[in-house]
Image (tube, rainbow, N blue to C red):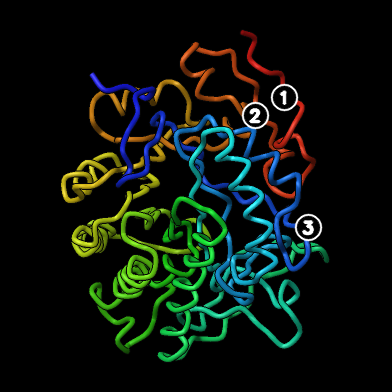
Amino acid sequence: MTTAFDPIDLSGTQLTNRIAMAPMTRSRAFGPGHSPTDSTVEYYAQRASAGLIITEGTQPSVVGQGYPDTPGLHSAEQIAAWRKVTDAVHAKGGKIFAQIMHAGRIGHPVLLPEGLVPVGVSAVAAPGQVFTHDGPKDFIAPRELTSDEVRETIADFASAARNAVEAGFDGVELHGANGYLIHQFLAPNSNLRTDEWGGSDEARIRFAVEVTRAVAAEIGAERTAIRISPGNPYNGVSEPDPEPVYTELVKQLEPIGLAYLHLIENNRELTVALRKLFSGTLILNAATEGFTGAGELALIEDGTADLLSFGALFLANPDLPARLKAGGPYNTPDPASFFGGDDKGYIDYPALES
């Protein structure tokens, strides 16, 4: 029987276990030009016992930023700063993928250089507000990307992926979930286009597929992955009937030969259906009532997933794989450290006694 503590070959990248650290926004890129700092190096190195670390969302371009102090992968100083992170993780025997995230309409002009505004699929504002250094701000209607700009944005993803490899990452995960740009193309309430990028299920899928193909062509499919969240209403997207859209999406992604598909689960039946369509490695962020924990490890044993991704529990327990194997004890996640709060997500949690 396969367990969470068995190794796995991720398209040529050897992982020591099947426990992944999920990508989690930190808003602590305080270095020059929104680059990681030494605290970021320590944070990821502490968690290098994960089979795979997936970083916080990292913007592929200046205009792709949606939150304060999030890191990028579009400048030389960012590449150099991330190299310190990847070197530290590799020195401890870990593997790390960069998550590339274009926020699209999620953001605000105060987060961008003067003269820039958020861009999106269509000029439709997301509901709600975003936190900024000036306090909460209502989302605004983004400037709709032209067809040429859509192509330029695809090129930005590919360029960021190339920069990630230069920075020493083992691969990249494209953020196609949680209401950000790729997901905005997929959802019918945020994509009102009638050109080649919208107007039908097939057209709305096109951006996600084209970005994935472009990145795979740039750095190799074995280093390319994508995260999706069918039916997830986060950030105001609405997908009343996700099954046909995501079934077709996965069918088109399947022949690319990706390193993995990372699924944020909302419906177990759809999870099982997509699993059957995708022959590669499936990382599952399982649907749970609370934090993903030890109870979900059975999903690897029964073959529902190949790896499981853990979020909040990894913040509180940098040595999470060892704690899961030992059956605990677990430090309780502190919500104050999740996003823009104190640094408890980085240090000072009690270590597991040997």
Tell me the residue that label 3 is attached to: 30
Left or right: 157 in relation to 24: left
Sequence order check, earlier mark of 3 and 2: 3
Residue drawn 78% across the image and 65% down it = 32
Give residue 168's quadrant in the image. Answer: bottom right
| Type of amino acid at the residue the image marks with label 3 | Phe
Question: Is the Cβ of the residue at disc 2 closer than 8 Å to that at disc 1?
Answer: yes
Callout count: 3
On-image quarter of the C terminus: top right
Q: CA distance from mark 3 to mark 2?
A: 22 Å
Residue drawn 75% across the image and 52% down it = 37
User: As displayed, is residue 13 above or below residue 216?
Assistant: above
Q: Secondary structure at mark 3?
A: loop
Tell me the residue that label 2 is attached to: 316
Give residue 203's quadrant in the image. Answer: bottom left
Tell me the residue that label 1 is attached to: 349
Q: Residue furthest top?
A: 354
Residue 173 image offset from top left, x and y in percent: 44, 55
Can you tell which mark lies on residue 164?
A: none
Give residue 76's quadrant in the image. Answer: bottom right
Sequence order check, earlier mark of 3 and 1: 3
Q: Residues within 10 Å of mark 2 (few under 14, many from 20)?
A: many
On-image quarter of the N terminus: top left
Q: Secondary structure at mark 2?
A: helix
Left or right: 4 in relation to 247: right
Q: CA distance from mark 2 to mark 1?
A: 7 Å
Closest to the observer: 168 or 2?
168
User: As displayed, is residue 277 above or below residue 197?
Assistant: above
Residue drawn 45% across the image and 91% down it = 146
Q: Residues within 10 Å of mark 1 (few under 14, many from 20)?
A: some
| Type of amino acid at the residue the image marks with label 1 | Tyr
